[in-house]
Amino acid sequence: MKKFLLSILTAVLFLSACSSGDDNEEQVTGKDAFDRKGMLINIADNIVMPAYHNFASDMAVLKTTTADFVASANVNTLLNLRSAWSEAYITWQTVSMYEIGKAEELSYRNFMNVYPTNTTGIEANISAGSYDLTTVSQQDEQGFAALDYLINGLSDTNTGTIEFYVDSSDGAKYKKYLTDLVERMDILTTTVVADWTNGYRDTFVANNGSSATSSLDKLVNDFIFHYEKHLRAGKIGIPAGVFTTETFDNKVEAFYKGDLSKTLFNANLSAMQDLFNGKHYASTTTGASFSSYLDFLNTIKNGEDLSQIINDQFDLSRSKASSLNEDFSDQVKTNNTPMLETFDELQKNVVFLKVDMLQAFSVRVDFVDADGD
Amino acid sequence: MKLHLKKYFKNNTEAAPLAVFRVFFGIMMFLSVVRFWSYGWIEKLYVQPKFFFSYYGFEFVQPIGHLTYVIFALCGLSAIFVALGYKYRLAILLFFLSFTYIELMDKTTYLNHYYFISVLSFLMIFLPANAYYSFDAKRKGISFQKIPQWTIDSIKLLLIIVYLYAGLAKLNSDWLVNAMPLKIWLPSKYDIPVLGYLMHQEWIHYFFSYSGAIYDLSIPFLLMYKRTRVFAFMLVVIFHILTRVLFPIGMFPYVMIVSTLVFFDSNFHHRVLKVLSRIFRIRKHFFDSGKTLKFKPRQKEIVLSFLSLFFVIQLFLPFRYLLYPGELFWTEEGYRFSWRVMLMEKAGYANFKIVDGKTGKRFYVDNDDFLTSFQQKQMATQPDFILQYAHFLKEHFENDGHQNVEVYVESYVALNGRLSSQYIDPTVDLGKQKESFKHKNWIIPFKDEIKGL
């Protein structure tokens, strides 16, 4: 009897010791035939951090050109500011999907790039001269889209735009708002980048378990979420009226700039595919990635070549989008069909990523009891 | 044979195993409720969602906002009363009703384990589990040390059915030939202590598949015979510990480990009760009255016929899938309530399209607006969920003022590592389809074949 109770007790103790990993971050003791940690290192060191550093320096340029424009608003400084904004906006597409760590905590993406922007709110802020850009209710009045309005949307002409900033009564207010927006984006960016540099990178790499809070699970979920919500729906689906009965040519990214929306879309699509393939930032070298992990798992189950299927679908989406107008707004107004067709191609990869890839990775969506039936 | 049966139903046995079972069952259930509550799952699963998936015919069973907590409290409280054996009949009835109500609120959370608890607690309503070592016995001043043999055997029979059917369900080509879905699940468990490094080994996937099937099929018999019982119980402990470590199945392993103790003979249970008595200063000898509980003939006849019917249903229900065409794992028609545990890794994606039947104008639904991620996951792979959700969407958008609402779904499902393929006929207006027990002919047939039971 005693032996009996003892064995049960031991069993229960063993059980709780082993299963504690459900709720906590866990440390890895077992060997792993696929080097998951290596994959996280590759993603952190060769993709995420270089992209962030590049973006941070673009933000620095944006900040300088803004200061130049504010100091002396003329066609020259305006054009410099616009090109710095475009550059930064394109680079933003390579970091926007990492809503993880500090970025998640700060709700970085929502403060950087909500579109369409709220022009009435912006004008109200400018004329009031006081506002709290850190509140969630002010997300529509800041970020790239708000800047778009301030430097591309105020007037059709350069001189017309400049007049807003040199106006004797309101010019200073416009300058202040422009400066504050750029300053806020820069602070957010430096905070996120500093966190990656000062410790988060190691946390990210070390959290290589298989719980719902592990880096891989979070990254995969972020990847799919971004693909579905921000790339597929935000950039194409919503303007094309996929989720509504009418189209919205004003809901494209970089609406006031106009001819940048396709460039931004392509930049984001490529960044997503490169992350999938573990392609080093601004290089052709590749390392361990979702793609190679899928290939590894496939050697166990001998299934279809999923990484190839997903890559093919990325390529199909890109080639379908190549026929689109540089300005998606124009495209929606003149002929929405190619937009819908592009959406359909993007949609097909949602299935491969969300169904097939998630299944292969056996990533858990939620922590609830489930027995797989 | 008839004489044999007649004699069997006259046999009496010690009541201790049933009393021990009652105590442990009550405690386990109470802990389950506490655990569920403490994880915030009541809020997350039954209070926050805007929409709940009902079982066909039980649409009236719905969460009742924050009062849902009261149902859980009732469930936990009645579990304690069951353990104590205080007002047992009422307590077990309340437990069965509250627990089953909880399970019926949303089939998203369906687990065979929960169904097992419902069925078991239903059975226990009819058993004299409070005859011995209970507050009821103390209160009434009469304790029965012996009870009819068949009362304890009915619990054993239920356990045998659970294991045996779970084992039979594993005899299919995905499980035995492809080691699926373990080939998908185990590699992701590379980080568990000690065993982690084994999880990528193909032989381990096969070893687990085969030993799992053999375990389920043989354990009822190993438990029944005295000679193999201790060995069998060790297997039970090892098996359920492993499942607990590898999979998120909550309290179930503990419940099963404790339940199988009912197979042990009464000496063991008396010793357990002695330990309990020492700890809680209970005078055990009061209960050891030597008296035998006898059912009134009429009462016995009713209970026995009722339980016979109950077990006949239990035996046949899992085979109802044979009445449906198509692959069971794919259509899931007749899948639930059949002890098919951990057989499938199924993932899906369902994109609903609302079309104005007259103008052809269309738009897609964002499922996040209506369902939790857990509900979406379950919905996408099960046709009855898809249909109920489609009906909900139709009603929702009609109330929003949309005209001629037709509901279509573009859905894809991947089963046990096969590449995803289209699941529901995208040209069928689901708004027009009715729920019934009939085959849903708008499910696109499975492209592959899974052989076996």
Image: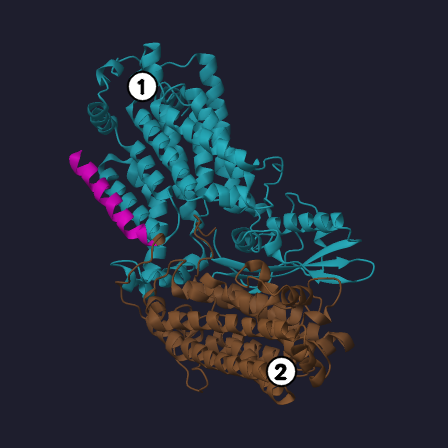
Dot 1 amino acid type:
Tyr
**Relative to A61, is B436 on the left or the right?**
right
Look at 63% across and 73% down and name the residue there: A174
Nearer the observer, A365 or B20: A365
The residue that mark 1 highlights is B132
Q: Quadrant of residue A337?
A: bottom right
The subunit letter for the residue under badge 2 reads A
Seen in the picture, residue B65 relative to B265 is either above or below; the reply is below
Res B419 visible = no
Residue A127 location, x and y as percent? Answer: 66, 66
Seen in the picture, residue B198 relative to A165 is either above or below; the reply is above
Q: Seen from this angle, which residue lies furthest front?
A: A168
Tag count: 2
| Structural distance between the alpha carbons of marks 1 and 2 | 77 Å
User: Can you tell which of label 1 and label 2 is closer to the viewer?
Assistant: 2
Res A29 visible = yes
Look at 28% across and 44% down and name the residue there: B237
Task: Check the rendered structure and report the hue given to chain B.
Answer: cyan
- The chief SS type of the magenta part is helix
| Residue span colored magenta | A1-21
Same chain letter for marks 1 and 2 = no
Look at 50% across and 79% down and name the residue there: A59
Residue B119 location, x and y as percent? Answer: 46, 34
Residue B32 location, x and y as percent? Answer: 39, 38
